[in-house]
Image (cartoon, rainbow, N blue to C red):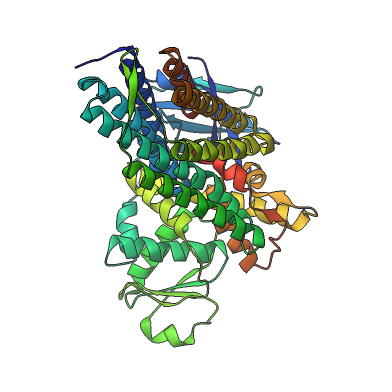
Amino acid sequence: MTEKRTVFAYCKKCQENIGIDVNEGEVQSQSSGLATVLSIHGEPEHGIVVYIDKEYRVRGIEYPSQLRVERKRTTIIESTVATSFEESDISFGTLIDTFGDKRKNAIRNFSILITHVLLSKPIYLVHDDFSIGKAVQGRIEKLFSDQMNLIDVISHNEIANMPSDSLVFSLQMKKIMNKCVDCKTKVVEDMIKDSLKEDSSYFRFTYQVSKILYSYKKLKEILSEIDESILDTELSRRIMIEVDQIPYLLTLAELQGFDTSPVDYNGLGRVARSF
Amino acid sequence: MAFALIHYISLISAVALFIATAAVGKKYASNRNPLTLVFVIFILLFAVSMLLNFSKGFFEPAGIEDALLSKAGLSLGLIVTALFSSFLLYPLSVQYRETTKQKIILVVMAAMWLLAGYAAFILGTLEIEFTGVVDGASNFRMPMAILGVIIFESFVNIGILLLVVLREKDPTFRTRTLILLVGYTIFITAEMIDSIAHLAVIVPLVSMVGLLTMTYGILRE
Ligand SMILES: [Zn+2]
């Protein structure tokens, strides 16, 4: 088996998904369970080290700063360190459970929060113990690789003063006090559920978040340039996201004032992609 | 017990289809797409109907159990065909939401189930009339109403699948769907000839080739 596969890894330096070609045989034969792949790309050239498991899922990305680039290539290095990605100081599951008494509600609430972040809406976490609120804020911001600045911590008696165009969530009551976006968030809920199944769920979700941020950015670029209609299946290929996730991103774009009418639902294409 | 080659052919088809079911089931576990779930049920029922054909080998051909299994197999065939139609038509109805076309598509979908229901009703009241045994398998006179419904719906399905193939630009999805289409067409044609002409074991062999082709299309990455 020497089939080639393309694995996508989100490179923070490029702010883009990088396609990495790997050999099936080389990935499967890794004794440590993880294949370590060095990808050199971009302008100026730089490298990222990507850890890929046997299911072709990216389990970790490193950004070596002292890497001298000699020529363009992608190589598999036999990994001697059986790198396993430890959870951060707190497990992803624990973070999720901060957002509801039951797992199901917590996942729903957290998806609503993520949706507000994607729409760049301000978010107020309410806790009378400021330090607890700050800790949760830090963990959420880490999911977004610290690239956003939308969250603040407030106390319960400040709730009334908050703008209506924001999300206000009480960490003590585990309840949404105010939200300004109301849409289906199943896509995000599924992302969370999938991540929770993984050993390194926190990292997994971080990766999913950066992917969806990237796709959403691309979608907005395409929507603002487009002058003729486009099939959503083609859009899915161009912004590198599953076609089932497109309606969610289109809803977000509409909420941000984009015209999504050029995007046509490809019914026949759905058939070909469903089995 | 009267196992003949024909029963083992059904068994091979059933096994292949169960493998395909597992593969699509795995896909459903990760994408949770309702359309994928419908396909899983479709292919699973298909597999079960092949298993029913195989289990005829446990009994005397043209006996009472054979008649029951034949009826069960036929009703599954009706459900499978109508379900496949819904699988193919539903995404189109979403595509044309809020237009007259959507209403037409939904009416067609309902008509497919009504026809299948009508055929199932006839099947329920039917006394199976065996006409003989060929190569270990019993033959019975197939009522034209049931046969007509299955053939009509299957050819509608083939037509829509053909549209999917023609419209698809992505080569990966086009090839997979084309293989599924070819396999399904071979299977339907063989079954059609079998129920009209009662030829020898060669026809079930061809229908098995059709099903194996379908399985290959599904398992192909
Ligand atoms: Zn890069």
Q: In this view, does B97 lie above or below A196?
A: below
Q: Along the line of sight, which residue is nearer the eye, B184 or B198?
A: B198
Q: Is residue A220 above or below residue A74?
A: below
Q: Along the line of sight, which residue is nearer the eye, A124 or B16?
A: B16
What number of labels is visible? 0
Q: Is residue A106 left or right of residue A216?
A: left
Q: Along the line of sight, which residue is nearer the eye, A138 or A264?
A: A264
- Residue B44 placement (x, y as % from top left): 36, 36
User: Image point 62% across, 22% down: which residue?
Assistant: A73
- Residue A202 placement (x, y as % from top left): 38, 49
Give the quarter of the image for residue A149. Answer: bottom right
Q: In this view, does A93 lie to the left or right of A145?
A: left
User: Image point 48% across, 75% down: which residue?
Assistant: A179
Q: Can residue A168 be seen in this view?
A: yes
Give the quarter of the image for residue B200. Answer: top left
User: Image point 49% across, 25% down: which residue?
Assistant: B187
Give the quarter of the image for residue A157. Answer: bottom left
- Residue A93 placement (x, y as % from top left): 31, 54
Outermost residue to the right: A227
Q: Is residue B221 visible?
A: no
Q: Along the line of sight, which residue is nearer the eye, A3 or A132?
A: A3
